[in-house]
Amino acid sequence: MKPYLLSMGAGVLVGVVYSLLNVRSPAPPAIALLGLMGILLGEQALPLAKRLFAGRDVVAFLQTECAPRVLGAPSAPKAEPVDKDHA
């Protein structure tokens, strides 16, 4: 139930922003796509900032986690352990 309430809250917030910008809903395709891109980038902003302030590797995070989520690319396959007995 919580994801549905959060989704509804986010939708209401976006509706308020659309109203403030005088954009009709549903928005024209270009505006809607830019909004979706902003959502995808915004989802990655907090994890990126946390890694940056913690001194962790940001470039690897961008390549392995951010890029696949934002660009819709498949994640890199995880390496399977090699079984030396059957190789």
Image (cartoon, rainbow, N blue to C red):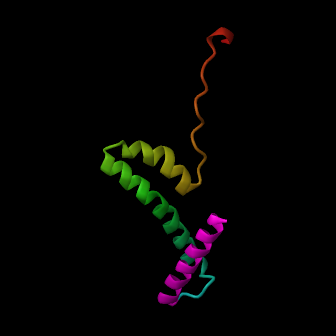
- Tell me residue 51's x, y (percent): 37, 48
Q: Is residue 62 above or below residue 23?
A: above
Between 27 and 54, which is closer to the camera in this rendering?
54
Between 79 and 73, which is closer to the camera in this rendering?
79
Q: Is residue 51 above or below residue 33?
A: above
- Tell me residue 74's x, y (percent): 61, 46
Magenta stretch holds residue 6: yes
Judge from the rendering whether residue 87 lies leftward or rightward of residue 37; answer left or right: right
- Tell me residue 59's x, y (percent): 39, 45
Q: Residue at x 65, y 68 (%)?
A: 4
| Count of numbered circles on the image | 0
Q: Residue at x 49, y 82 (%)?
A: 17
Judge from the rendering whether residue 50 lies leftward or rightward of residue 68; answer left or right: left
Quarter of the figure that contains the N terminus: bottom right
Residue 83 sits in quarter: top right
Q: Residue at x 42, y 42 (%)?
A: 60
Q: Main secondary structure of the magenta part?
A: helix
Outermost residue toward the top in this view: 85
- Tell me residue 45's x, y (percent): 42, 59
Please give the range of residues in magenta: 1-22
Magenta stretch holds residue 65: no
Q: Residue at x 50, y 47 (%)?
A: 65
Q: Is residue 20 above or below residue 60?
A: below
Quarter of the figure that contains the C terminus: top right
